[in-house]
Image (cartoon, rainbow, N blue to C red):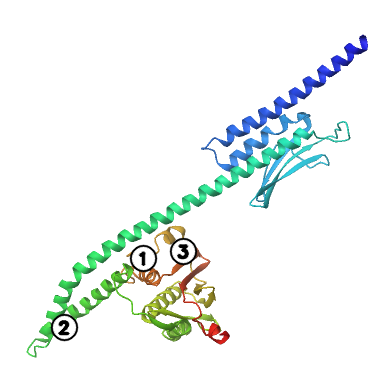
Amino acid sequence: MANERRANKHLGEATSRALNERVKELSCFYHINQIFETLNISPHNVFNHIVELIPPAWQYPEIASARIIVDGREYKTSNFRESRQRLSVDVIIDNKIRGAVEVVYSEEKLLPGDKPFLKEEQNLLEAISRQVAFIIERQQAEAERAQLQKQLMHADRLATIGQLAAGVAHELNEPLSSILGFAQLIQKNPKLPSEIVHDLQRIVTSSLHAREIIKKLLLFARQTPTFKGHTNLNNIVSEAIGLFEHRLESDGIELVCSLCPFPPELTADAGQLTQVMVNLIANAIQAMPQGGKIHLKTDIQGKYVFCVVEDTGVGMTEDVLDHLFVPFFTTKEINEGTGLGLPVVHGIVKSHGGTIQVKSKSGKGTKFTIRLPIEPAITKGNKEKL
């Protein structure tokens, strides 16, 4: 009878311990879920909070410490140190290991079966690793959504400015044409004093300059028709380079060309694409007042042709990059730029169904990548295979 009472007592104690362990584990996961639902805490603070909740849920919390590793960054309890008695579960996102959640004992403890950790503790750590993965995925989703929102706002702003620019350009064209026409008509009068002739020439020159600005505005707003035909991108690059040969040499700028061996032929407006290259090369030169290197590259990938213009110049800040294609935005001095060069480049590339990407760091240089669609089986390389 006494043996039975002792057995029942031990059974009761074991049941109580097991129940206590389950309560600790559930409390840990409950508090982790509460932290996970707190939207105003940054992911780094979330992981710092979570890692502190892990050791109390283990069977020997007084000697337990924990660590969370995410993309090489560690979040650990103050008493954490490496140990042989270690339980670790990988944090997996999209079938890739992005980190781990670990618990270690600073002293050796063994359970029946020579195991330091309970099966339930293994399950809990796996659940925590999944929760850590959810936090990382949510962080990525929010970052991607913010970036997409930023791109949409930028595109909407450009579209609005484009409509405004087109309207202004059309309204200015007619009176400007009248000013230019009358000024040129008056110039034909042989009896004009020299002072008036000089002033008339200034009117004509200014009118022609204004007309060029209007033309750029219409290009940006895609209001100017393109005259597309079969053209060779390598030839366009070479023609643009030819305009800057002497300047490159005098400014101490090295030019490196990596042109596609099978020049891609595409249906495009050669004049407009030449203007794109001229603008990008001119900007690269201006970004290297002390000399440097320009790398020009053309390539074919699938149904697209790529053109890269990269320099080792002064680069751009994030704020400048955000306004790069906004008309009249310029970092140049007054009378040194209209702020229409890159907006025009953007408009021309878009009108050809292409895209333009910019990567730049202040003091590290700038890289423009233009992608234009080409028709299948158009390249010389493809023709030779037929």
Q: Tell me the SS state at disc 1.
A: loop
Residue type pointed to by label 1: Thr
Residue displayed at 35% across by 70% down: 344
**Which corner quadrant holds the C terminus?**
bottom right
Q: Nearer the viewer, mark 2 or mark 3?
A: 3
Identify the image quadrant of the N terminus: top right
Q: Residue furthest front?
A: 386
Q: Is residue 108 left or right of residue 330?
A: right
State which tag comes first along the sequence, 1 or 2.
2
Kindly indicate whether the residue at mark 2 contacts the one at mark 1 (C-beta within 8 angstroms).
no
Q: Residue at x 63, y 52 (%)?
A: 94
Q: 198 and 284: which one is in front? A: 284
Give the crowd class for mark 1: few <14, some 14-19, many >=20 residues within 10 Å: some
Q: Secondary structure at mark 2?
A: helix
Give the answer, above or below, for where 53 lies relative to 193.
Answer: above
Query: How far across and down, in percent of the image, does residue 213 sit?
Result: 27, 72
Task: Tell me the residue that label 1 is attached to.
Answer: 330
**Residue 123 appearing in the image:** yes
Between the residue at mark 1 and the residue at mark 2, the CA separation in whole angstroms equals: 32 Å
Q: Give the side of residue 3 with respect to residue 315, left or right.
A: right
Question: Which residue matches tag 3?
Answer: 316
Q: Quadrant of residue 331?
A: bottom left
Q: Amino acid at mark 3?
A: Met
